[in-house]
Amino acid sequence: MRFPRVAVIGVGLIGGSFALALKAARLAGEVAGAGRGAANLKLALEHGVIDAIAPDAAAAAAGADLVLVAAPVAQFASVFAAIAPALKPGALVTDGGSTKRDVIAAARAALGGKSAQFVPAHPIAGAERSGAAASSADLFRGRRVVLTPLPENRDADVQAVEEAWGACGARVSRMDADEHDAVLAAVSHLPHLLAYALVHEIAGRGNSAQLFGFAAGGFRDFTRIASSHPEMWRDICVANRDRLLEELDRYVEKLRALRPVVAAGDGAALEKLFAEARAARGRWLAGDYE
Amino acid sequence: MRFPRVAVIGVGLIGGSFALALKAARLAGEVAGAGRGAANLKLALEHGVIDAIAPDAAAAAAGADLVLVAAPVAQFASVFAAIAPALKPGALVTDGGSTKRDVIAAARAALGGKSAQFVPAHPIAGAERSGAAASSADLFRGRRVVLTPLPENRDADVQAVEEAWGACGARVSRMDADEHDAVLAAVSHLPHLLAYALVHEIAGRGNSAQLFGFAAGGFRDFTRIASSHPEMWRDICVANRDRLLEELDRYVEKLRALRPVVAAGDGAALEKLFAEARAARGRWLAGDYE
């Protein structure tokens, strides 16, 4: 057994699925879970997602061979502070945070000399569902997990964490943390903000019932991510706000440039833009950028 | 048989599905199709979507009891002009256009005294697929069709068109054309423009391959409608540009108001907005606005 004792701090969709996937791959022995929601932890225990409920993060981490921190990113500083004294030598820590610069800063500040044991990871496998009950051993299958290793990490430790995520079925790659946060701001964080903003704008109108009443499949898919976990996305937007603002400004500029094209009824320019966008999306769906 | 002879001008997803659904409901006898794409018409004939290929719109409409115009909306003026002389007394015309003020103006200009035979309709049942091959007798099942009747329509004719769409399984309602165009600009036309703009913006960057490479399920759903038919959406955006611009301005203003909230890292305000949007979307999904 590669990791006889695993601790999951935050047994939500990501944490629960990681536990199930590691067990299915026979890499994990006993999994202890810790988190804020007692009812959620109880559910996770009943569903066999975890084997034991730890009273707190430190207790879960004590004696663990592998710790996954999978809470909303604003909680990472306190989680790292809690587990730091409990981490045994040789234990590995990884995480499920959607932003990496802030998570790394929190780890460095709280883990001190033990920061070399932390190999940051971002499993790109969200869903609008959340909580332990939504967990699945297959959540990461075919999905990307980005590692943003620290200079102080031992190569063997990075490789061990890479293997753990790989055993969950993920396609694991490595990237610089700065680059990660910039890329994800563009293709994930901004779209979430845009979808939330559109739904909120419509919900705030006097005729919102009529507007929603005639919204159909296109609206449903465009706004699916506006059903995402508010606290999780609050933390992501705050943590990555510099990059998110760059993307927001760029997008508003794009819309501003599009306005006179629409106003002029310039069909040729609109059709060109629409066709180019469709073609690019088609190449993406076809796997050209895998 | 309610409509012994039906003409479909534009045998795409909407036109083909209307033909199949009317036949399944045993309301249509022989269906003649006309359109620009010879290969597409041949496919429609081979798949039994239509029973005959007419050489042009006028030939299809001659002798028809019911005519559906289901071309991109910029073509409606020429289609109406072509079918006007061929329309027999008592024949009904309806359409599948996503905008209604421009379609009505085109009908009034080209049909003259026969405009009373035209009952405008918008089946809210798009898909990113297009063409006769994508047709299905079930496309309209449970979907909304909005009629925007003309003052000169006979009540019995509006009712007959309502019954035809109803027989396709649609939930048919009536609305003023102005109101229709305003409502659809908000919940359909703007989201399409936003999705196309985001994909185009990303596709235009030097690192677009990397950005697409780390885009996941949220991005896929958010941008699904950016795979929609460019010509169809060009015509919609041009035809409804005044209402679309109002919506675009309103949305850009929303984003502008959101910017300082993100910049300040105001987590409480972000969480409130996200939670309110999620709750509104949840009510919509639960059917509160049906």
Image (cartoon, coloured by chain):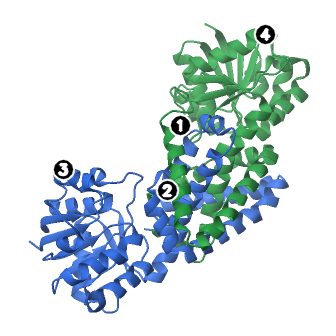
Chain colours: A blue, B green
Residue appearing at x 67%, y 14% in the figure: B5
Left or right: A265 in relation to A151: right
Mark 3: which amino acid? His
Return the residue at label 1. B134
Q: Is residue B269 above or below residue B113?
A: below
**Label 4: chain letter:** B
Give whichever of A216, B204 is nearer the camera. Answer: A216
Q: CA distance from mark 4 to mark 2?
A: 47 Å
Mark 2: which amino acid? Arg
Whether labels 1 and 2 belong to a single chain: the reply is: yes
Left or right: A233 in relation to B128: left
Whether labels 1 and 4 belong to a single chain: the reply is: yes
Give whichever of A273, A243 is nearer the camera. Answer: A243
* Quarter occupied by residue B43: top right
Q: CA distance from mark 3 to mark 4?
A: 66 Å
Return the residue at label 2. B220
Give the x, y percent position of residue A72.
39, 66
**Label 1: chain letter:** B
Give the x, y percent position of residue B233.
69, 47
Q: Secondary structure at mark 3?
A: loop
Q: CA distance from mark 2 to mark 3?
A: 31 Å
